Amino acid sequence: MKKTASPFQIERYKYLPQVPLSLQNPPDRISFRRGDSTESVDDQAQIKEIFPHTYGAPLIYFEKGENPRAGEAINVGVVLSGGQAPGGHNVIAGLFDALKGGNPASRLFGFLGGPEGIITGRFIEITQDYLNQYRNTGGFDIIGSGRTKLETPEQFEKALAVLKENGIGGLVIIGGDDSNTNAALLAEYSENKKAGIRIVGVPKTIDGDLKNKYIESPFGFDSATKTYAELIGNIMRDAKSAKKYWHFIRLMGRSASHIALECALQTHPNYAIISEEVQERHKTLSDIVIDISDIIMRRWNNGEAFGVVIVPEGVVEFIPEMKTLIQELSGLLAEHIKHFSTLNTFEDQSAWINKNLSRDSSYVFSSLPNNIQRQLLIDRDPHGNVQVSRIETEKMIIEMVESRINECKNEGKFKGSFHYQSHFFGYEGRCTFPSNFDANYCYSLGYNAFIMIACGLTSYISSIQKLAYPVKDWVAGAVPITMMMNLETRRGRSKPVIRKALVDLEGIPFRTFLAHRDGWADKTSYCYPGAIQYFGPPEICDRPAETLLLEAGLSR
């Protein structure tokens, strides 16, 4: 063990993750049955044409049975792709234990630094002693991660060459929607080349947007949201104690508001923006500002000059006029990036932008706080696109709320005051020690991934269902990655991608939030989740996320 290990870390090494009943047999005693054949969620003809060798595969369910192939010696590679999420180390632990349980001579190789390691052939062998330093811990530091995309024939050819040269017969890609899309593309290429390498994926993202009927939650969402909810609860207690600040808290979640919704259900804030609702109801930025400032003034008049507002980081892309502005800005900056780089002052940049934007977008841009205008212009990716996740949306809303409240004061409509604090919770949740739920779930996903490879499956994603129930009742299986795909335009080209799951405005979690939020707005109803509990009663330590419980009709 590392000498720098904390007492908690040492104790956590001892935790033995639970797995579903179907995975409690030795790997060569786990077989599978085929379910229904599948189709992609949309664009079926085009997706089938892109994936002729892997499209339409059936759903798979694991059960007790005979599987002699699991006892054959095999080398398997594993890669961590994209941003960190709690539990990644346990996915690798489950994969390792299943592989060695099938045949001790089998070997596991970890590619270093993400998918780039597959292309360049940078890897280490993961041994028992090495792995034991990482069991039940957070982070991806066991082999590191990266954001290189595997999407070109040249990359596929290099990857297959590295795998073949090192006798690797199976590859597990642990990542989000883009990473698992790339896994499917590499698997299709491998099948076309008759390489005989089985490639499977594991669903990961704290954002919660890689989910559907068969992937009930990506791993890491549970631990991250519990971490954020603890911090929000602490701030709520402070706000209620000091009684003088409004706290605006921006949370991760660019493409969907699952994190914001889950944290709201756990903590009961005075106001929480759900981006999908903003888009569905065509709410403007002004509408949001009016909503929040009205609540602030009502609460002041009721003797409560404090509150908490939750803001998902990607909300600006869901506000109609802001979405249009960002699209226009991205187009302008991408097309004229050389000329724009010659404009040395913000004033020159702003003048040029306003001259080239449409009238409506120019008005929106000019109405934004100065520091937000600067962020929209300065923070761009290598292709000239605005990096929305770096916009301090909570500060933009604060400035606009303050401006409206001052207008009301000047008009004699409000006699109180408005004091505020801003926060961004992001990286704090990505590498926390995984909750018991994520420790169990991730270990099961990894164990499951080896069974998939041992059963000869390729272009599948590891699936564990019935997650709101006790672990023994979870259902282990595999889902064809192509089943989750549709076509989307990326950088001007139509590409197959896994469809992101947005918050379902007709779903029970959002409807539960909707039923309570007016009461939470005016009455202080804060709930304090506290820190993640690892030792103690299962009803506290093993409790799934509120979203999962509500979706299963089990919330209490």
Image (cartoon, rainbow, N blue to C red):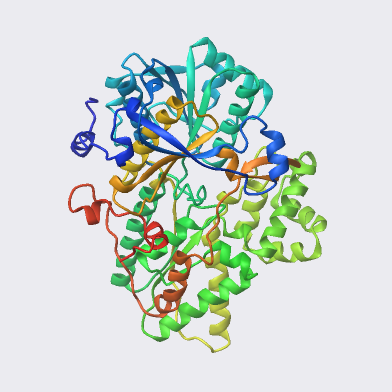
Observer able to see residue 54: yes
> Where is residue 187 drawn, in percent x and y?
58, 27
Lateral position of residue 139 relative to residue 392, left or right: left
> Where is residue 303 drawn, in percent x and y?
36, 84
> Where is residue 546 drawn, in percent x and y?
37, 60
Dividing the picture into quarters, in which one does residue 400 lie? bottom right
Residue placed furthest toward the bottom: 412
> Where is residue 128 drawn, in percent x and y?
28, 21
Q: Quadrant of the C terminus?
A: bottom left
Residue sitting nearer the eye, 199 or 329: 199
Looking at the image, residue 298 lies above or below residue 491: below
Q: Identify which residue is drawn at 38% across, 25% down.
A: 67
Residue sitting nearer the eye, 536 or 345: 536
Looking at the image, residue 106 lies above or below residue 186: above
Picture mark count? 0
Observer able to see residue 336: no
Q: Identify which residue is drawn at 75% across, 54% down.
A: 328
Q: Identify which residue is drawn at 45% across, 66% down.
A: 508
Looking at the image, residue 31 lies above or below residue 465: above
Residue sitting nearer the eye, 494 or 346: 494
Residue sitting nearer the eye, 550 or 78: 550
Q: Quadrant of the N terminus?
A: top left
